[in-house]
Image (tube, helix red, strand yellow):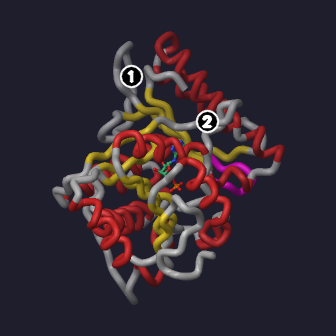
């Protein structure tokens, strides 16, 4: 069913595999003055991804979802290899929510031989995820720029779940002066608070429970930092996560929301973002909260 250009999984979703076919298909809508929205994903879709698409569906005429496990943003070959790719299930979900276009390119469609890419992202590429996953944001910006060039969206949605990624894409859009509205959508969580992630399926039942320490600690921090003071609340959070069974903490940082500079004190009303990365069951999990917002 998914073998030739323009084949339909259902009567609603247009599935395209090639850049040329996609840009030609979208050009006809653009000529009619239709607004096009894009949600770039790596597939293994969950309700978090679908919430981004629902936003696009509400505010744009044509919703485009790309599914591409982008090799250049993986600094860990095992993570790339183990990344889930349930494409039939993804297409079913996209059909159910009424997504208009799905772009599923092969690696060769997106990358030429020996292609290079460098963009100056400054400290955003040097702290937190940038520091711990060297080259990750170069790979992210490389593929997002390619997707933006093909789709030419009016709007693109990204999740707060990947907070630093949003800032990086924002910076890239500024560098290239792209006329695209970027929207950050809230993190969708499981009923018990765990941030939804395609990687969660790799957690064992026990690991799944242990991973809850991340969101619990974020909430605990949010509830106490004004009374305890930021330094003490941060120390407590780090102690809690470090002592958490089955979990290996990479960072717990309280930062300015735009620069991601570490913050050492805070008063009520300050806009801050608290970011965490930790390993559970050999799976790297990230989460964050913006202080003042409910989790
Ligand atoms: P990914 O497939 O992991 O590259 O994610 C594609 C998009 O979905 C990114 O903009 C993510 O930030 C967003 N996303 C991932 N998980 C969630 C979530 N739990 N809630 C909201 N958006 C999410």
User: Does 206 sit left or right of 166 as displayed?
Assistant: right
Secondary element at image label 2 = loop
- The image position of residue 154, as x and y in percent, is 27, 52
Q: Earlier in the sequence, mark 2 or mark 1?
A: 2
Magenta stretch contains residue 242: no
Mark 1, other Cα within 10 Å: few <14 / some 14–19 / many ≥20: few
Quadrant location of the C terminus? top right
**Residue annotated with mark 1:** 265
Magenta stretch contains residue 282: yes
Quadrant location of the N terminus? bottom right
**Number of marks present in the image shown:** 2
Secondary element at image label 1 = loop
Q: Please report the residue visible at 38 percent of the width from the left and 36 percent of the height from the top.
A: 262
Q: Along the line of sight, which residue is nearer the eye, 294 or 18?
A: 18
- Residue 269 vertical position relative to residue 260 in the rendered view, above or below: above
**Residue annotated with mark 2:** 189
Q: Along the line of sight, which residue is nearer the eye, 54 or 96?
A: 96
Magenta stretch, main secondary structure, is: strand
- The image position of residue 118, as x and y in percent, is 29, 71
Q: Please report the residue visible at 36 percent of the width from the left and 56 percent of the height from the top.
A: 125
Extent of the magenta region: 278-284
Q: Along the line of sight, which residue is nearer the eye, 202 or 276?
A: 202
- The image position of residue 14, as x and y in percent, is 48, 65
Query: Which residue lies most toward the top here?
Result: 227
Can see residue 252? Answer: no
């Amino acid at each position: 069913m998914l073998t030739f250009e323009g084949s339909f999984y259902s009567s609603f979703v247009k599935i395209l595999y090639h850049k040329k076919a996609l840009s030609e298909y979208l050009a006809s809508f653009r000529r009619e003055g239709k607004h096009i929205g894009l949600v770039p994903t790596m597939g293994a879709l969950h309700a978090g991804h679908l919430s981004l698409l629902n936003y696009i569906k509400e505010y744009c005429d044509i919703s485009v979802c790309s599914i591409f496990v982008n090799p250049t943003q993986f600094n860990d070959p095992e993570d790339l290899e183990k990344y889930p790719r349930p494409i039939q299930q993804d297409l079913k979900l996209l059909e159910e929510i009424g997504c208009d276009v799905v772009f599923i390119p092969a690696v060769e469609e997106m990358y030429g031989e020996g292609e290079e890419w460098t963009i100056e992202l400054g400290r955003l590429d040097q702290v937190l995820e940038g520091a711990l996953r060297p080259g990750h944001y170069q790979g992210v910006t490389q593929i997002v720029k390619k997707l933006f060039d093909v789709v030419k969206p009016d709007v693109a949605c990204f999740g707060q779940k990947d907070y630093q990624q949003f800032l990086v894409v924002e910076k890239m859009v500024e560098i290239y002066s792209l006329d695209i509205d970027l929207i950050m959508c809230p993190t969708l969580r499981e009923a018990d608070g765990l941030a939804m992630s395609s990687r969660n399926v790799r957690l064992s039942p026990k690991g799944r429970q242990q991973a809850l320490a991340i969101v619990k600690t974020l909430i605990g921090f949010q509830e106490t930092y004004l009374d305890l003071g930021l330094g003490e609340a941060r120390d407590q959070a780090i102690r809690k996560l470090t002592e958490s069974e089955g979990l290996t903490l990479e960072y717990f940082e309280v930062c300015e929301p735009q620069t991601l500079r570490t913050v050492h004190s805070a008063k009520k009303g300050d806009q801050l973002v608290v970011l965490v990365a930790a390993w559970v069951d050999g799976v790297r999990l990230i989460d964050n909260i913006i202080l003042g917002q409910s989790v």
